[in-house]
Amino acid sequence: MKKIIRLLTVMLLLLSVLAGCTNKPEEKGSVATDGSTSMSKVIGALGEAFELETGITVTYNATGSGAGISAVLEGRCDIGLASRNLKQEEIDKGLVGTVLAYDGIAIIVHPDNPINDLDLETIGKIYTGEITNWSEIGGEDATIVVIGREAGSGTRDGFEDITKTKDKCVYRQELTSTGDVITTVASNSAAIGYASVASVKDTVKAVTVGGVAPTEENIKNGSYVVQRPFVLVTKKDTKLSDSAQKFFDYMISEKARKIISDTGVVPAN
Amino acid sequence: MKKNKIFEDIVHGIFLILGLITVGCVVLITIYLIISGLPAIKEIGLINFLFGKQWASTAAEPKFGILPFILTSIYGTSGAIVIGVPIGFFTAVYLSKVANKKVRNIMETSVNLLAGIPSVVYGLVGMLILVPAIRKIFKVPDGASLLAAIIVLAIMILPNIIKVSITSLDAVPKEYEDASYALGASSTETFFRVSVPAAKSGIAAAVVLGVGRAIGEAMAVMMVAGNVANMPSLFQSVRFLTTAVSSEMAYSSPGSLQRNALFSIALVLYIFIMLINATLNFFLKRDKEK
């Protein structure tokens, strides 16, 4: 009996030592951001410039729009990043969205594909399975391989919203990252996909939509129609920490415009 | 004397805590999965959830049927076993009984290396080489399919099958084989009539271990299977139980039915793996009792 009591005491002592580790000191001089993987470039550039200017570090966790929004809600980060507008149920929970920039979504095909232009309606028909062969729209005789993103992805949400194909898309592949989509389209001459304009590389060809190319200017003036917002998510009733507020103000300031546009997206302010 | 005892007690205490950490993790994960997995099943209905043929988690009228995922996981794993087990089994027999020491050393090293390759590398190679190859060989529009996943999984489970089979084949007492030779049996007869039956339960354990690895793999499969929630078919894009969870988890909003349903899928997968583990224990125990 004595031995057991002694053993328990020792264990309790050890546990209390371990428990001490979890009391993290209040962090000062750092801002935590969390969310959309599509926003990594823009937040990375802004964070770096901000840190250089103020000495406050900015951390970024690439988890996805949904995860970023929940992180703000649960207080696990200062500023959430979403590559879509907030849903009504999220606004009801007390969240506020501030548009930081607009990101164009490029429609990409294999470089060997003779098709150079598609209109929004045709893109919709391809994605809903109404058009299944490239020859129907003046291409070669090959079955169209429709590549998209997974359900819940900001890019997919944005794309399906803009092309009015919500819940109707018939995908051949649903991939979980922009890079995967580009790699897959680059390796299949009959494939079509969509990806952030900023991340499109030379391995694929971005088609013009209704004759308008996905350039920064066209996205800014609204003539390129396949685009979506990059949103900063904060809590309505909770004040940001001083450093987070500074970063927030910095991001929507005049100074940040150039940094934002340098990353290939179009600043909103 | 007393000092010594206190020291002993401290050491025992530390070991006990370390042991309890493992047990605690298992208990915690199990409880967490059950608690977070049950609400969605309750809301959707067990029959609708397990046997529903349609999955559209973000649609305006969401549908949460995971039969395509369950069947895909079963087909994919069985396919990998059908391809992987014969190759792995004969390799093990060869390495354990026939090969000379030098060959065995080289081959065992490469098997170990194969086991150490991260699954994302399998996925990448599959995506860049296997998928386009399937497209060209079978003349299908796109190569990302159940077949691609089966081939990748078959290669991934090879090291497990080979290593465990070798261990159990090596453990067969030499006297058994000597007796067989003494009776005039050829070496092939000896291997398949004496050594293999004697190592039977170890080989069965190897197969079960392979099943466990195949059914739990997510990353490599996600990159080659296409991830569309179709009912499984060899050249169709399919989604496994594992990839169903991992592909949608990042973007699902917390507390939503979609997120809860993903936990329910994880719970189903967990039950599958528990069953496989129970089977494994059964084989290993039977081995010991003999």
Image (cartoon, coloured by chain):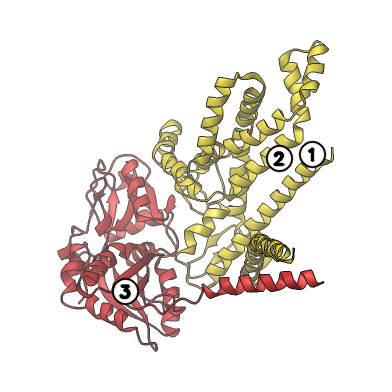
Chain colours: A red, B yellow
Residue on which disc 3 sits: A231
Query: x and y percent of residue A122 in the render?
Result: 30, 56
Q: From the viewer's perspective, is residue B247 above or below residue B101?
A: below
Distance from disc 3 to disc 1, alpha carbons, whole Å, reads 60 Å
Residue at left offset 48%, top offset 41%: B117
Distance from disc 1 to disc 2, alpha carbons, whole Å, reads 10 Å
Subunit ID for the residue under disc 2: B
Subunit ID for the residue under disc 3: A
Q: Secondary structure at mark 1?
A: helix
- Callout 1–callout 2 Cβ contact below 8 Å: yes
Residue on which disc 1 sits: B287
Tell me, yes or no, if residue B82 can be seen here.
no
Res A229 quadrant in image: bottom left
Q: What crowding class fits label 2: few (fewer than 14 Cα within 10 Å), some (14-19), or many (20 or more)?
A: many
> In the image, is B126 to the left or to the right of B274?
left
Between disc 1 and disc 2, the foreground one is 1
Tell me, yes or no, if residue B196 can be seen here.
yes
Quarter of the rendering occupied by the N terminus of chain A: bottom right
> In the image, is A211 to the left or to the right of A162?
left
Q: Secondary structure at mark 3?
A: strand
Judging depth in this view, the residue of A121 and A96 nearest the camera is A96
Three-letter amino acid code of the residue under disc 3: Val
Query: x and y percent of residue B124 in the render?
Result: 42, 43
Between disc 3 and disc 1, the foreground one is 1
Residue at left offset 34%, top offset 59%: A124
Please tell me the numbered disc located at residue B205.
Answer: 2
Judging depth in this view, the residue of A189 and B244 nearest the camera is B244
Three-letter amino acid code of the residue under disc 2: Ala
Residue at left offset 76%, top offset 42%: B283
Q: Are marks 3 and 1 on the same chain?
A: no
Distance from disc 3 to disc 2, alpha carbons, whole Å, reads 52 Å
